[in-house]
Image (cartoon, grey):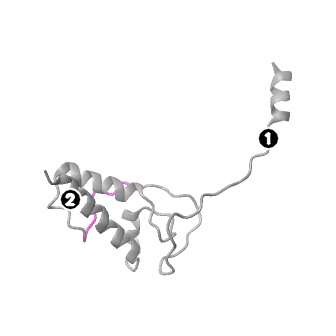
Amino acid sequence: MAVLAAFVWALRPNRPNVKPAPLRPQDAACPQLDGEFTPTNFTELPGLELDSLSKVRRNHVLLRLNMEPCPCGCNTSIAYCLLSHARCEKCKELAQEIIAEERDRQQP
């Protein structure tokens, strides 16, 4: 068994270290942070009008804001960027688009 493991280990191909390209252009107003994207779990986001949404749509909005990365390059979720980078206009625009999409889905 050890010989087989050594043989497989010796044959393993070298894997390139590849990073995905950014999906949207990065904004110079936001700090560029190193590291991997980590989703957040905020349940309240002051400054967003979520009261007009049903509970299901409100949860969809919060899920998307917590799970989608902000396009400014800060490697944080849209929700985190909304709370910590007040100057980031991209995350504000994207949050309003997400709210509008969920509001349209709510209509019968």
Where residue 7 sits in the image (x, y, percent)? 85, 28
What label sits on residue 103 in the rendered view? 2
Figure check: 57 above or below 31? above
What label sits on residue 13 in the rendered view? 1
**What's drawn in magenta, residue-wise?**
40-47
Q: Which residue is found at the position 45% from the left and 61% from the top?
A: 69
Q: Which residue is found at the position 55% from the left and 64% from the top?
A: 22
Main structural element of the magenta stretch: helix, strand or loop? loop
Q: Which residue is found at the position 48% from the left and 56% from the top?
A: 38
Most extreme residue toward the front is 108
Distance, label 1 to label 2, CA atoms, is 49 Å
The three-letter code of the residue at mark 2 reads Arg
Foreground pick, 46 / 93: 93
**Count of marks, rendered view:** 2
**Please, what secondary structure does the residue beneath circle 2 have?**
helix
Quadrant in the picture for residue 88: bottom left
Q: Earlier in the sequence, mark 1 or mark 2?
A: 1
Most extreme residue toward the top is 1
The three-letter code of the residue at mark 1 reads Pro
Local crowd size for mark 2, using a 10 Å CA cut-off: few (<14), some (14–19), many (≥20):
some
Q: Do callouts 1 and 2 mark residues in contact (Cβ within 8 Å)?
A: no
Where residue 6 sits in the image (x, y, percent)? 84, 28
Figure check: 58 above or below 12? below
- Magenta stretch containing residue 43, yes or no? yes
Quadrant in the picture for residue 12: top right
Where residue 39 sits in the image (x, y, percent)? 44, 55
- Magenta stretch containing residue 72, yes or no? no
Where residue 80 sits in the image (x, y, percent)? 40, 65
In this picture, residue 18 sits left or right of residue 54: right
Whether residue 75 is visible to the viewer of this picture, yes or no, is: yes
